[in-house]
Amino acid sequence: MKKLSLIQLVGLVIGSIVGGGIFNLMKDMSSGASPAAVIIGWIVTGLGMTMLAFCFQNLTAKRPDLDAGVYSYAKEGFGNYMGFNSAWGYWLSAWLGNVAYGTLLFSSIAYFVPIFENGSNLPSIIGASVMLWAVHLLILQGVESASFINTIITIAKLIPLCIFLVSALVAFKIGLFTADFWGQLASTWGKGASIPSVIEQVKSTMLVTVWVFIGIEGAVVFSGRAKKKSDVGKATIIGLIAVISIYVLVTVLSLGVMTRSELQELKQPAMAYLLESIVGKWGAQLVNVGVIISVIGAWLAWTMFAGELPYEAAKQGSFPKLFSKENKNGAPVNSLFFTNILIQIFLFTLLFTEQAYNFAYSLATSAILIPYALTGFYQLKLSLQEKSTSEGAMKNILIGLFASIFGVWLVYAAGVTNFLLTMLLYAPGLIVYSMVQKENDKPLFENIQEKIYASIIVILFIVALVGLISGMITI
């Protein structure tokens, strides 16, 4: 089978991270934070994601046999059950995110073809369904052909972003950017800001960056199909640096073109109307085209990821065996089919109510944080085990430590409520896991630790359920 090159892997990383969220980033970031807090937020996120990327790079180099990436690290470090949970949460997050891509795509197309309205009416659902199965057929032709197209889409969608950045740089006013640098904080700390309020504002930016950075593990998921194992780590780091640079420039430059209150009043996607204020109507048209291209690219990348991970997990006995079937092109045909059937079902629910979709989407955003945290934990565990024999051991320990702290911070920033609600996704996985263990003639749990993990998840599931029923937890 043809292997993926470094350029294709970098395209997957950038394509999977930079989705539609970037085109509304300036509005989302400024709504809860001043320019200073936004900058601090990007520093925290940049450092944390760099540590997480180093984890992926280091683990790929040290354990090239773990070529299912995120899932395989959790399994190797913390047993079959936690490995399954990592794969389960990652899979749920990927395909539920694709439901959003479908609606976002057609809400952007509606700028040019009004019949699609807000992206969740019948014409939009029909269009999204056609797109869904078109992507399905494309990937069935082989992962490498689909990734080639994704690389082209990634390059194409960067063009409107570059035009926006150049335009915003020309229109940038340093006086506007610094005039209200600490925002509303200025009145709460004499001439500055109180520490608690700064932390709260930075925390609010994390809620945005958690979502817009999901996908950094993109190249690792396909590490088994890379031409060179060393390319996987390189692709992850190159992709991360590129994405961080774009995100920082988009938000910082925007705060020098409009005030926070003006940014918060913009319609979605905010970048379209911000560019329109600088260059005219063609700017909004350009950005909406960018949104369409960006979402198609992200949809393609995440459909590939969503199909690949259960396939790899099934080959290693952690998902039902039927997920391991390939077609003649080496595409995970059953895994992809079941994934897209679930997406299709959720697309149709949008015709009746958006509440179920919003509920599932908020859970999916939090679900992937646990696989990220487990990756940091495994990096730390592996580095501690090798501290006396491995070169650069202390560096690897620190990388694992900081990545673990960052993983916990992300869960905290997402909020206790989101964490509890996430258990509503993880607990049903126990039923599927029991089917897998029975299929493999293995006991449900292999040690006391796995029983403890399962008990905690079930207890948190019950707490979340009671909270929802009683009204203590609201969506």
Image: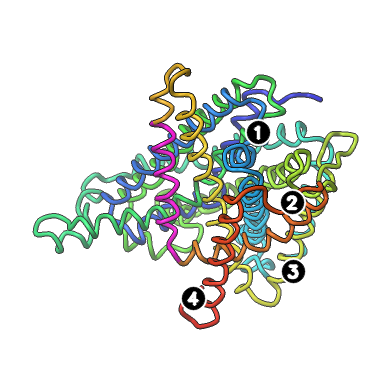
C-alpha separation, residue under disc 4 versus residue under disc 1: 40 Å
- Percent x, y of residue 184: 22, 62
Identify the element where label 4 is drawn. Answer: loop
Residue picked out by circle 1:
151
**Residue 105 in view here:** yes
Looking at the image, tell me whether mark 2 or mark 1 is earlier in sequence order. Answer: 1
Give the extent of the magenta segment: 398-416
Q: Residue furthest bottom?
A: 470
Q: Are marks 4 and 1 in contact (CB under 8 Å)?
A: no
- Percent x, y of residue 113: 67, 62
C-alpha separation, residue under disc 4 versus residue under disc 3: 24 Å
**Residue 156 in view here:** no
- Percent x, y of residue 272: 49, 54
C-alpha separation, residue under disc 2 versus residue under disc 1: 44 Å
Residue picked out by circle 3:
348
- Characterize the magenta stretch by its predominant secondary structure: helix
Residue type at tag 4: Thr
Label 1 crowd (10 A; few <14 / some 14-19 / many >=20): many
68 is within the stretch colored magenta: no
Residue type at tag 2: Pro
Q: Residue at x 51, y 65 (%)?
A: 420
Q: Is residue 282 left or right of residue 186?
A: right
- Please tell me whether residue 398 is drawn above or below residue 18 in the rendered image: above
Q: Are marks 2 and 4 in contact (CB under 8 Å)?
A: no
Residue type at tag 1: Thr
Residue picked out by circle 2:
443
Q: Nearer the viewer, mark 2 or mark 1?
A: 2
Q: What's the mark number on residue 474?
A: 4
Q: Residue furthest left?
A: 190
Looking at the image, tell me whether mark 3 or mark 2 is earlier in sequence order. Answer: 3
